[in-house]
Image (tube, rainbow, N blue to C red):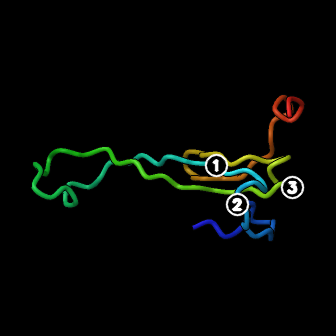
Amino acid sequence: MISKCANPACTAHFLYLHEGKLFRVLHGSEEPPALQMGIDPTVRKRVQRVEFFWLCSACSARMTVKYEKGSGIVVRPLGKAFRAAS
């Protein structure tokens, strides 16, 4: 459940969907064979999990949520081109 802004430096609490921006992130991973009940243990199954992150209005105007290999989900500043288009 989302309770606050995804920006660790922000203390804004999530109250309404129309305030800020909601991000849906799909996490893909291979499920370990032990969790595949009744299936050949040499077969690996692709599993996707959905997670939601929220940035408050102030943070979403200048930041975005993205996945970075090795770091996971991070909050980063928007690129110059994206900010100009907003």
Q: How much space separates mark 1 and mark 3, taking CA atoms? A: 15 Å
Residue drawn where x is 86% and y is 35% of the image: 83
- Look at the image and tell me in which quarter the C terminus lies: top right
Q: Mark 3 sits on what residue?
A: 58
Q: Rounded to the nearest whole Å, what is the CA distance between mark 1 and mark 2?
A: 10 Å
Q: Please, what is the three-letter code of the amino acid marked with disc 2?
A: Ala
Q: Which residue is mark 1?
A: 23
Which amino acid is tagged 3? Answer: Ala
* Mark closest to the chain's N terminus, 1 or 3: 1
Residue 15 vs residue 82, the one in the foreground: 15
Q: Nearer the viewer, mark 1 or mark 2?
A: 1
- Name the secondary structure under disc 3: helix
Circle number at residue 6: 2
| Residue drawn at x 63%, y 56% as measured from the top left | 53
Could you tell whether 17 is left or right of 37 in the image?
right
Distance between mark 2 and mark 3 Cα atoms? 12 Å
Asked whether, in this view, residue 43 is left or right of residue 86, the answer is left
Q: Earlier in the sequence, mark 1 or mark 2?
A: 2
Crowdedness of circle 2 by 10 Å Cα count: few (<14), some, many (20+)? many
**Of all residues shown, which one is farthest toward the right?**
84
Which residue occupies 49% across, 46% down?
Answer: 26
**Residue 61: % across, % down:** 85, 47
The answer to the question of whether label 2 and label 3 lie on touching residues, with beta carbons closer than 8 A, is no
